[in-house]
Amino acid sequence: MKHLLIFFVAACFVFTNASAQEITVSGTVSDEKQQTFPGVKVVFANTTDGVVTDGNGKYSITTQKKDGLVLRFSYIGYQTKEFLVADQIELNVAMETESQIFDEVVVVGYGSTRNKELTGAAAKVKGENIEKLNLSRMDQALQGQVSGVAINTNSGSPGGSSSIRIRGLSTFGDNDPLILVDGVVYDSEGLNALNPNDIESINVLKDATAGIYGVRAANGVIIVETKKGKLNAKPKIEFSMYKGVQQTANKLGLLTAEEYAVIKNEMFAFGGQSMPFVNTAIGEGTNWQDSVFQSSPVESYNFGVSGGTKNTRYSLGATYYAQEGIVGGSKANFSRYNARLNLSTDLSKKLVLNSVFLFSSDNRSTLSENGIGSVLYNTINAFPNEPIRTPDGNYSYLEEVADIINPIAQMENSYNYSIADKFVGKEELVYKFNKHLSFTNRFNYNYAVVEAKSFSPLAWYGPGKYANSALNAELESPLVEIADSVFVERGASVYEQRSSFSDLTFESYFNYDRTFNEAHKVKTTLGASVFQRKGAALNGTAFNIPNNSWDYADISANTATGGYLNNVGSFEFKERLVSAFIRAEYAYDSKYIVSGILRRDGSSKFGPNNRYGLFPTLSSAWIVSEERFFNLDAINFMKLRLSFGVSGNDQIENFAYRALLNGEGVYVFDDLIVIGTALGRAANPDLKWETTRQFNAGLDLTMWGAIDLTTNYFIKNTNDLLFQPDVSGVIGSYGPGGSSPIINAGNVSNKGVELEVAYHNKPSRDFKTNISLNFSHITNKVTSVPEGVDYLPGAQFSVGGDVATRFEEGFAIGYFHGLQTAGVFQTQEEIDNHDVVQEGARPGDFIFIDQNGDGEITFGDNLDKTFLGSPIPDFTMGFALNLRYKGFDLGANVYAAIGQEIIRNYERQQPYANQLDYVINRWTGPGSTNEHPRLTTGETRNTSFSDYYVEDGSFIRLRNIQLGYSFPKKSKILRKLKIESLRFYISGNNLVTLTRYLGFDPDIGGGTLSAGVDYGFYPQAKTIMGGLNIKF
Amino acid sequence: MKNKQTRLISLAVLICGLVFSGCDKFLTVNPPYTQDAENYFQSPEDYEQALIGAYDLLQGTFLSVWISEIASNNTIAGGESVNDTQGLHQIDEMTHGGVNTELRNLFRWNYAGITRCNFIMENKDNIEFVGKDKILAEAKFLRAFYYFELVKFFGDVPLIINERIGAQEVTEIERAPVSQVYAQIEKDLLDASLVLDQVSLIKGKATKGAAMALLGKILLYQKKYSDAANVLDEVINSGTYSLIDDYTDLFSVANENNSETVFDVEYTGAEGGGYGCLICLEGNAGPGFQGIRQYDGPIYGDGNSYNLPTQNLYDAFDPTDPRRDMTILDIDAFIAAQTNPENITYGIGAGGHTGYYNNKYIKRQNELGLPDNDLTSPVNYRVIRYADVLLMSAEAHFQNGNISEAQNKVDEVRNRVGIETITVSSIDDIFNERRLELACEGHWFFDLVRWGRAGSEIEGFQIGTHELFPIPTLEIDLAGGNWSQNNGY
């Protein structure tokens, strides 16, 4: 109404001044395809005179004549054009679309919209930015690309997974977002199978507008689109490949044999034991790390064809990728074949068929990693005075500690693989009733067959070693008593599992999009979806594999007496989801946009009491720059966004609402194992999904035509967390195989600010720059814990040690909790005069701070423990630079995570275990140091979990740097070879990491309560690659 | 045009309607091939299977044995460091409080056992079949066993019988007085003893003798001496049991289920296991944990040096008493006596070292289970052996004034190991004999407590507090915070 009034007043003004000297400009506006362009705003700058082009793109505008009159043509999504007019003229204008990010199409779930009209907080990453990094997994490539999305590596081993956290940790359980590839649900573990080269774009829905996916949207949604062809385009053939060498980015500073001998002697002497080394001049000794880490290859070959005819678009491709581990080489490798077909064809004028087919076959072998007994754990703790092999050629036994084994022998005895063949596809029929209304029906499927095998040969690591499977060094088989005095040999064994998983989704929806009277734009989506996931597996173990050899490692080759050793297992599950959803959007005058979403889900994960849920979302946007009053020249585009909505999380095990008899009830009668039944997890018929309420306020700006800026502030409160907290032992759910019921309790809040800035400039024909920077700050806080519970315990520090992480009200999820130190006692006198009693303290021991002020340090309770840090960074940053000058291009990608802490938990507190070389600076007498405690094999509290073991895990990493050269388009060589373009490049990943963290790699993932706990993490490799891209 | 749109809208509505009308049926997915807790107990086999599940928790007894020795003056905690299984170190030093993983495990495991028994009792009337009475009797025996553990450690505890309870109901349950818990235990054991066989053909099953002996022990704990004497004498007079000749043969796998065995917890080495879930093991975790640290030599296997006998215990034995060396391994003396002592090595843990190892339950090379063999010893834990019955009977008779009966029983125990008899002139003589005969078998702390001697024997023991262990603080919280903590904690 107000606007009509302004218009009316303006119109009157024009009429009343008709007699003054006037100027009239008229003409036709067209778009890029030379078609007439209705609805374009034509305004004289700094006046109120404006019109809109008519149905034929024609306009005529009159204003008072004066100097410096500027006529401005604008339309959302198109570059604004300005012309200086002095006289009455005819002016025909061709509009050009903007090449800036706000014009891009963003997929928002069951439809798409232009970034400019987006009401929610979403981000888009182009496929080329993913492809360029040459990483095996798309999620690894996503690190640092989008604000508010934290990617941490769970394992740097080939094929290792990452954790994806959109806008912080919000649940105790599964924090993975919903991932959809061309609309097909993809679980984050299975992302290995996805080829980064196939990706056209990744859209991340971060706020409540993800609520179109209802009960699964609370952790955000990642929508991956694969590459598509173009209509009326000649076949475009592409080939790209790279080859590289990987090395460890970091080795730890460990004690040399001589340092080790000196320090161990001292430790033993302090512990009142005889010194183990008579002679300490034993030189450098063995560098176990040098023997374990190796250079290993990585390579990728990718081939693709895309194009289209009059009514068909196609894109197809094939890729091979292979990577070996920097630890273990071929024993820790990953390789993958991908094939892809993306086909879209107009079956008739009104009916379109979209078909996607993705095939992948990946093959992975792994070593034991990330924990006591893993290869790197053993490498760090192996004794430097021992050789790898003894003079007789056998691997050394490292005899002094039962649970440290020779890591080289361990790798040699590791045999396993897992092959996953995966078929992902979509068949979609879109019927277009008219320009405005379409009806889409699609069928998505995701079928995977996984074949896994692992072989446990008879192995001997030395007397008393936990990992021995043989009876002695001669590799004799142990005997098992199967009946009274009847023994059978238990030789090498092989475990095999075949499992299959299938997801089927049927979706059906209407899209309606129409603009009435040139100002009222209505968009609606209405639809329904049915989803089913099924899985089944069969596994078996066979013993007495011939020759103790991997060559015969198959169940068919077993020679064990039937029935006694060999065993089998299986499982099956099924889950279903039924949903209906509606989204309605109204935009007035391309300025004011309001959108509402309502989704109803029914999920088989929950019992009849709480099976259905309703998820509403409201969002709006105001494009300020479209207002007439808005005339800041520096700002080309400005939009304000608000959204609020509710979404859910149903990521729990199936059947958690029921009490099952899947506990373990096994006992021994007559010396034989008898298997009974027992209660498993307790029931909770009232179980329901977690609910996330999220508010988002955002601002999008384009300035000086060169800088795009997006910023968001959000509050994300997750309530009714799906929990499996401790329950009273009296309920009886802590027997073998039993567990407490999953309940809804506890709340978590994440608040944050996100900022993305992109600068693009092309100062000359030859020079082009693109710089982008993103920044996220998230405050995570547990706002309530289940009733009756003070905190939920998380990861343990060291062996059988203190609980080091907690879920507790008022703190970040998984924060570190332990004793705080205040230096080291230097003398007995200092201890005696200390105003706090610290039992057992001796000179050289830590001074612990008496947190509760009772004058005593108590180790048996938590009273003197406090907050020691959090694994959640204060802020993360991503920075990308792309420069192009003539044929050369230079790109760099930097990621930084600042303000998080890591627990150093890979050191074994065993008398003989090797140690990091910081212990050289240990306390040796009064005044020697106030930082490091004395070392002893005797009783000490210095190994209790304290801030001494918590390190600053901040880091800045140059994730990728790349220098390429493209041959000039018209160069003779290219013409001769009939090549359209040819580019060579060299590239390096993880070349530089700035950090103070002592461990291998500060980029550590992990579970919700074990995040930031370093168990001897398999580090990410440093890679140098060379590659080429050819287009024909 | 209008018509078309109306049609479309009706179509849309129809689709949505269809989708949701068939929903409930579509969304009711039953777990494939899985038995449900609510539709179980349909056949005799179901009862037998559930009973095996109830027996399973007996295997957690290794923990109670540890604590009963470490808390006493018999042993120290030991281990890799003072942070290694901290709860045991705190108990060793009598500094334990409400935050103690080991005590909490004990609390949880025994209630898990009780719940599995109650699950059977809850469904006891579902069907009738021959042999059901015996299954129910065994369930009652097990329930009594688990409740006795709880009442011994924690005093007043919630008493739940014949039903399972949920998280909400827990908050409404009070701690039942010790007397009430004991009354239930007595009733269960008496019921069981009327049904159970005198001797079971299946090794490991509860018998009438086991029920009676446990009942006698419980009566003794309540100082009901004359009842205790009667019940224990019934066990003795049944003629089922006798002491075996060789004391040093009592604790081997080879000699399990002998005439002295009244009740054992059964273990096997035929299933491997890991540290992740100690209650899931089918082997005995005790011997490996109590094994010699980093040992490389004959006879013994290497272990984790837990639960190490003290000098005080060693000195309690007369050097001529063969039970000393069977109970305690003097590691340095042992090594020195071997043919090539210089080749034999062992390590010392920072959790403490006494020079002695628990020789009754220790990892031996000829008694190894599957990997990790620190945890999978096949050695049964002897819960009640006949010598214990004799000494309990002696104690009951002495307290009743029947000194000659007491003397006879003590003589029988001493005669077996071929050492001089003593004249039983005071109750101390019987107490001392109990220590010598049963050291490191998980009785001593509670013996000292019930005799009121813990205060003078155990360093750091505070009279009025340490007779009971604290209820785990988290368990009080999780039960709604209404229970009071035990005195002094």
Image (cartoon, rainbow, N blue to C red):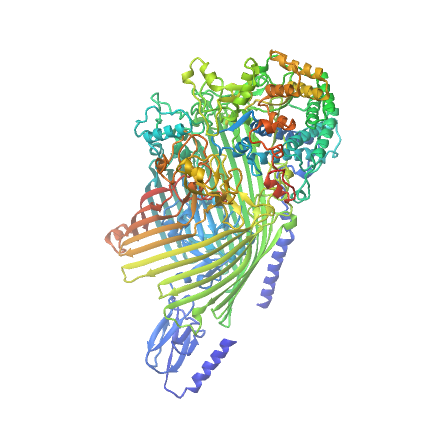
Residue B195, position in %: x, y?
Answer: 74, 25
Query: In the shown orientation, is residue A735 left or right of residue A219?
Result: right
Relative height, residue A974 to residue B277 (above, below)? below
Residue A985, position in %: x, y?
Answer: 30, 48
Query: In the shown orientation, is residue A97 left or right of residue A559?
Result: left
Nearer to the camera, A434 or B333: B333
Outermost residue to the left: A972
Query: In the shown orientation, is residue B414 left or right of residue A794?
Result: right
Nearer to the camera, B250 or A165: B250
Q: How many marks?
A: 0
Outermost residue to the bottom: A19
Relative height, residue A348 to residue A243 (above, below)? below
Name the image quarter holding the N terminus of chain B.
bottom right
Residue A55, position in %: x, y?
Answer: 45, 73
Name the image quarter holding the C terminus of chain B.
top right
Nearer to the camera, B309 or A794: B309
Nearer to the camera, A642 or B188: B188
Relative height, residue B450 to residue A347 (above, below)? above
Residue A1014 visible from this viewpoint: no
Residue A19 visible from this viewpoint: yes
Residue A721, position in %: x, y?
Answer: 56, 49
Quarter of the image for residue B416 reads top right
Q: Report the residue at 36% width, 65% height from top.
A: A705
Query: In the shown orientation, is residue A610 left or right of residue A236?
Result: right
